[in-house]
Image (tube, helix red, strand yellow):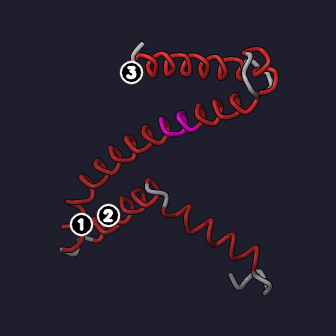
Amino acid sequence: MTHGKKESSQTIRRAERRRRVLELRKSGLSSRRIAEALGVDHKTVLNDLDWCFADLAQQQRATTEEYRALHTSRLEQLLHPMYKQGMGGDVDAVRAATAILDQLARVHGLYSLGRTWHRSRRSTCSRSSTCC
């Protein structure tokens, strides 16, 4: 067996084991029970679960980024004419542009960043609750 075929068969076995680990975990088995059922070390099961969860998280991030890019593009298309009109003195266009900018900030999580910082500052502040 060549080196490439050996790696390929190991990769297939690992992928199948990870699929089985995830399946058993979803069915409610503990990682120790999964290790016993599959005849592998408990740490192998933990590593497989970590890998599966990281892979799922990566897939979710990719989907989220695709959605964010699409939504950003749409909002920017709406913003462009409003910005020009607003710069020309159209008060309604300024309001519309401000609302679009607000949506863009939300899409990119800018408000949640400020809120997180604000909460952490408040929880560590020794002064009155009105200072932060």
Looking at the rendering, the stretch of residues picked out in magenta corresponds to 54-59
| Numbered circle sitting on residue 48 | none
Q: Position of residue 100 (x, y in %)?
A: 36, 58
The quadrant where residue 23 appears: top right
Q: Tell me, yes or no, whether the highlighted magenta stretch contains residue 8.
A: no
Q: Position of residue 47 (x, y in %)?
A: 65, 34
Q: Quadrant of the C terminus?
A: bottom right
CA separation in Å, label 2 and label 3: 57 Å
* Residue at the image position 61 percent from the left and 18 percent from the top: 17
Question: How many other residues sit within 10 Å of disc 1, few (<14), some (14-19) or many (≥20)?
Answer: some
CA separation in Å, label 1 and label 3: 58 Å
The quadrant where residue 15 appears: top right
* Residue at the image position 58 percent from the left and 34 percent from the top: 51
* Residue at the image position 42 percent from the left and 40 percent from the top: 62
Question: How many other residues sit within 10 Å of disc 3, few (<14), some (14-19) or many (≥20)?
Answer: few
Q: Quick one: SS at disc 3?
A: helix
Say which label, 2 or 3, has the lower sequence index: 3
Question: How many other residues sit within 10 Å of disc 2, few (<14), some (14-19) or many (≥20)?
Answer: many
The residue identified by callout 1 is 83
In front: label 2 or label 3: 3
Q: Quick one: SS at disc 1?
A: helix
In front: label 1 or label 3: 3
Q: Position of residue 9 (x, y in %)?
A: 48, 15
* Residue at the image position 43 percent from the left and 61 percent from the top: 105
The residue identified by callout 2 is 97
Q: Is residue 69 above or below residue 37?
A: below
Q: Is residue 128 above or below residue 46?
A: below
The residue identified by callout 3 is 4
The quadrant where residue 88 appears: bottom left
CA separation in Å, label 1 and label 2: 6 Å
Q: Nearer the viewer, residue 110 or 51?
A: 51
Q: Position of residue 129 (x, y in %)?
A: 77, 80
